Image (tube, rainbow, N blue to C red):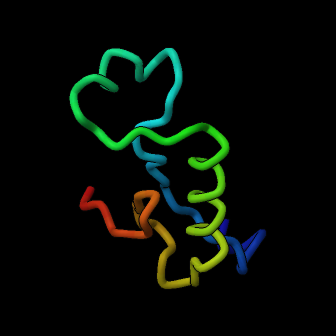
């Protein structure tokens, strides 16, 4: 990737718990649940601020690093 797109950043993003059918069993556990549109907005905000130093990182919807 570095040769073909040297400006590209590869990062993993965790959206948090999103109100979908998949997360329905977890929603009653007291987790903070986000509407899909809000989750997308959070992820886009994280993407907007990523720099080259973030390459290979794993970040949550609050822009906090998640250890691999």
Question: Residue 55 placed where, x, y %?
Answer: 51, 73
Check the image and report above or below for 36 versus 62: above
Drawn side of residue 62 relative to residue 42, left or right: left
Question: Residue 62 placed where, x, y %?
Answer: 42, 65
Check the image and report above or below for 27 versus 39: above
* Residue at (27% x, 23% y) in the render: 28
Check the image and report above or below for 38 versus 18: below
Image quadrant for the C terminus?
bottom left
Drawn side of residue 40 relative to residue 11, left or right: right
In depth, the one of 3 and 53 nearer the eye is 53
Check the image and report above or below for 36 versus 53: above
Drawn side of residue 68 relative to residue 5, left or right: left
* Residue at (30% x, 61% y) in the render: 66
The image shows a total of numbered marks equal to 0
Question: Residue 40 placed where, x, y %?
Answer: 64, 49
In depth, the one of 28 and 60 nearer the eye is 28
The quarter holding residue 32 reads top left
Question: Residue 49 placed where, x, y %?
Answer: 60, 79
Drawn side of residue 17 relative to residue 55, left or right: left
* Residue at (72% x, 80% y) in the render: 7
* Residue at (48% x, 47% y) in the render: 15
In depth, the one of 20 and 50 nearer the eye is 20
């Amino acid at each position: 990737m570095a040769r073909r797109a040297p400006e590209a950043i590869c990062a993993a993003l965790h959206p948090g718990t999103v109100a979908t059918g998949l997360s329905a069993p977890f929603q009653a556990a007291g987790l903070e649940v986000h509407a899909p549109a809000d989750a997308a907005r959070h992820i886009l905000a994280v993407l907007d601020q990523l720099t080259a130093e973030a390459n290979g990182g794993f970040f949550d919807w609050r822009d906090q690093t998640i250890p691999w």
